[in-house]
Each structure stands twice: as structure tokens, then as C-alpha cells.
Amino acid sequence: MNPNNSSTVLSQLTSKRQDKGLLTLYNVFITILIIVTTIYLIQKGITRSRSFRAPFVGRRFSWEPKWLIGLRFSQAGLEHLAEGCKKFNDGIFKVARNDTDILVIPNRYVDELHSKPEEHVSAIGAHMKNLLGKYSTIDILQEGNLHTHVLQTKLTPNLGSMISTIEEELRFAMEEEIPPTHGDWKDVSIYEIILHLVARISARVFVGQPTCRNQEWLDTSIRFTEHAFLTIAILRRLPKFLHPVVAPLLPSYWAVHRDLQTAKRIISPIVKQRTADEASGEPGYEKPTDLLQWMIDAANLRDGQPDKLAHRQLVLSLAAIHTTTMAVSYAIYDLCQFPEFVEPLRQEITDSLEQGGKWAKTTLGKMHKLDSFIKESQRLSPPSLLSFQRIVMQDLTLSDGTTLPKGTHISVPAAEVLQGAEFDSSFDGFRYSRRRQNSGEAHKYQFATTDKNSLHFGHGKYACPGRFFAAYEIKMIISHLLMDYDVQFPPGASRPKVFSADEVLLPDPSTRVLIRRRTGM
């Protein structure tokens, strides 16, 4: 046999074996895909058969597929929810989010549901579902309630003694983050400035000095949220069964894990050093007063592992930084749009400081107009259109006979902007300060108060445990900016529109404003 012919035959046989192998792999892949898709469709069918019967909003045609409605909801959440609230008034309807159906119920059910135990309606389950805990790494919060316990029993009761610390860090942050103006107007991205102010203050309260001024920690705490939310936004557009396949292909997914490793590298040694310092019994030892130390003190053996404490600190930064940044940004935009409120607010701040003598909890408590202005800003620019999100953990019959099947994702409209013709769209910065004067229930109209009509911080057992810290932080940032700077939109510009991402509303981070240090400040 000719050697050349032999090699040709061998090559052909090898090629055929390779083709056969590839064909086999292809057939296996197709078979697995068919099986997985079938299981997914069966599960969807079972879920649909047991789901609460309610009309979908946002559907243009009766035959329109739900995935298309969900795709539109990602960009037109406000329109879909406003349609539902107007069309069904005090009734029940559904919105199709790409990753789930959400049953929107009236707020009259809040008082009945907020006292239900986690085993009946799960707030944590809804958070994990909304934020894709497995892929954003916030699922560490399911391991225990250490963060909630410490925020409620340590941070909130100690806020009064921390105001001077917050004010000190805010002063330092403003010098670092706001460029010198030398008496002239300076064009700046106010969102970026506020983002870094909030990150610095949060770091001072959460991890203390000197870590709060570690630029790598500050950058990581900011980027982690951006990377996590980008991962969530992409995966939400896909069926759940594809998440394990697609997630590892996303650069943002790996960025989340890099951020986590950076957090552990920075925070874990601090935890170990603090533990060793306390154990040493040195007479000059002073225990730090910050959230990290309180978590070290309160943690059990598992939660107290340095890497786990570092992980929780990063996740708490996610919760604290960007929502507060949005609230301050909206308020600054409103001050630019309605400058007639600037001088009355400055006068209130001046009067409160003269009466109190310094920045303190009582001083901030006197600023009713500022509190009202922030609450009004949030009324018109809420962080989310939906609140009180829960997963029904077992079939639940409400007092009026309405039965919610197990697995139902429920929520309540959180924004007055959904009220249609009844909604007062005019901006009245002192709306709530007047109500506090004329009401025997003045506390109802405070920014941080929650009830069935004020749901931006949630309500009940799982209301945001850090809302009082957020309220003080927001007040202090806005009051310092008001007293030290003039801010206005550039000529011809006006308040920017918000962006919609499903039920979440976001300010335009590219918005520019003009800023100038006030004379004598």
C-alpha cells in the first residue's frame, strides 16, 4: 500500500471519527436543551395554573406574548403601572417583568400583611429574587440577621452621638470632592460629587478611620453596586434556567467577585487586628465606635468570620450608597428648578444652628421645612414604583376572602405618581411641614416615617433598618451644600427626566449643574 494512500485513508477515518464525536456531542447538547426547556415550560405551566387570576397591564394585543410585555416594562414601568392603577383603581392586576410576574395589590392590604411572619410572606425571599442574590452575592444576608440586628440596636440608638463624626467627615469630603470655584460658576456632574460624598460618609460610619479614607475601599464600595446591578439587569432579561449558563460569561459577574475579594483583602485584616487588640487587654485600648465593631461584637462564631464580615460590609455599602445618592440628587435638582425654596431653607438651617449651637440630632430635628422638602422631592421622584415586595410562602387567605397562592410575588404601588387624575403633580416643598403644624399626628409626615401610604422605606418588620441614618445623612449633605454653595442649572437647562429600569426610577447621572462657593463661606 502506498504510504501516501495510507495516510489519506487514516486522515479520512480520523476525520469521520471526529465528525461522529462532534455529532454525538451536538445530539447530547440538543437533548439536554430540549429536556431543560421542557422542564422549564412544565414548571411555568404549573406555576401559571396555580397563579392568582388577574389581568396583565401593558398588553397591546390579546395574542401578544408575555415576554414582549416584559421587555417593554423594562423601559416603560411607569406607564404600565400607571395604566394598572388607573384602570383597576383599588383593584388587583399584574405586571410582567422579564424574570417574574408581579401581582400588584392595593395598599389597604399592607396593615394586614406587614405583621405576617417570614414563613407566610417573605420579604427576604423577594429581595433575593429581585437582586438575584446568588449572582450578586447578596445571598450572604440569608445566613442571618446580623446586619438588621446591629442597625436597629446599635446604629440607630447611637446616631445622636455620631452626628459630629458625620459632620467632620462631610466637611473633609466636600473639600476633597468639590472642585475650587474661586468665586466663579463651575460646571460639574453633581451626581458624581454626591455619590462620593455619600460613599465617604457611609465608610466613616461603617468601617471608621483610617479605612474610610482608603481610596481603594471607597472605589470598591461604589463599583460593587454598579457591577452587581449590571449583572442583575442582564440576567433579568433571560429565563431563570439560563442564568447559570449566562452569568459566567458576563464581565460584570466576574467584576462583582473581584470586588468581593478586594473587600476581604482590605477588611479581614482589620477584623483580625481589632480582635487581637481587644484580647490583649492593653490599658490604653479604646474600642472603635463604628458598624464594623458592633458587628464583630454581636456576631456568632459563623457570622464573625473576618471574610464574612467583610462581605456584609460590602453588601451594606450597596444598600446605603446609591439610594441615598439618588435622594440627594433629586433634591438638588428640585432646588435648581424651584429656587424660591432656597432662602427659607437657609434661614431655617441658620435658626436651628443658633438654637442648638452645633450640628446635633436635636438641631436636625428642628429642620421641619428641610425634612418636608426632601419628602416632597421623593414623592415626585420615588426610588421605586413598587414597594412592600413579598413572596407568598404558603397559600394565604386574606380577611376579605382573597386567596394568594403559594409562590405569588406580591407588591404595592409605592408612588403617588401612579394615582393619575388624583395625583397632585405640583411641587410644594413645604407641604409636609404645614401638615405637621396642623396635625395631632405630626410624626406621620416625617421623611423617615413608614405606613401604608409612605412605603419608600418599606413598612413593618422589614422596613429599611438604616432609614434613620439615611435621613440624617441626606439632611446634612443638603444643608451643608445649601449653606456653602449656590447651585443652578446651566442656561436653558431644566430638571432632567428620570430613567426607568423595570419598577426602578433612576436619575440621569450625566446631568450637569453650575456650582459656586458662596461669598464668605
Image (cartoon, grey):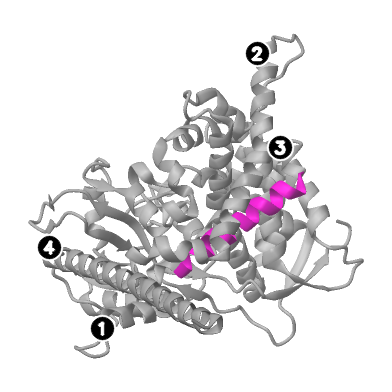
Comparing labels 4 and 3, the label whose residue is closer to the camera: 4
- The mark nearer the N terminus, 4 or 1, is 4
- Which label is found at residue 165? 3
Query: Helix, strand, or loop for circle 1?
Result: loop
**Residue 369 visible in the current orientation:** no
Q: Name the residue under label 4.
A: 50
Q: Position of residue 443 (x, y in %)?
A: 43, 46
Q: Mark 1 points at which residue?
A: 65
Q: Do the residues labelled 4 and 3 touch (CB within 8 Å)?
A: no
Q: Nearer the viewer, residue 132 or 359?
A: 132
- The mark nearer the N terminus, 2 or 4, is 4
- Which label is found at residue 279? 2
**Label 2, label 4: how many angstroms apart (C-alpha)?**
56 Å
Q: Where is residue 21 in the image (x, y as percent from the top left)?
A: 38, 71
The verdict on residue 81 being magenta is no
Pointer 4 local density, CA inside 10 Å: few below 14, some 14–19, many at least 20 = some
- The mark nearer the N terminus, 1 or 2, is 1
Q: Where is residue 235 in the image (x, y as percent from the top left)?
A: 43, 67
Pointer 2 local density, CA inside 10 Å: few below 14, some 14–19, many at least 20 = few
**Label 4, label 3: how many angstroms apart (C-alpha)?**
53 Å
Q: Give the range drawn in magenta.
A: 214-234
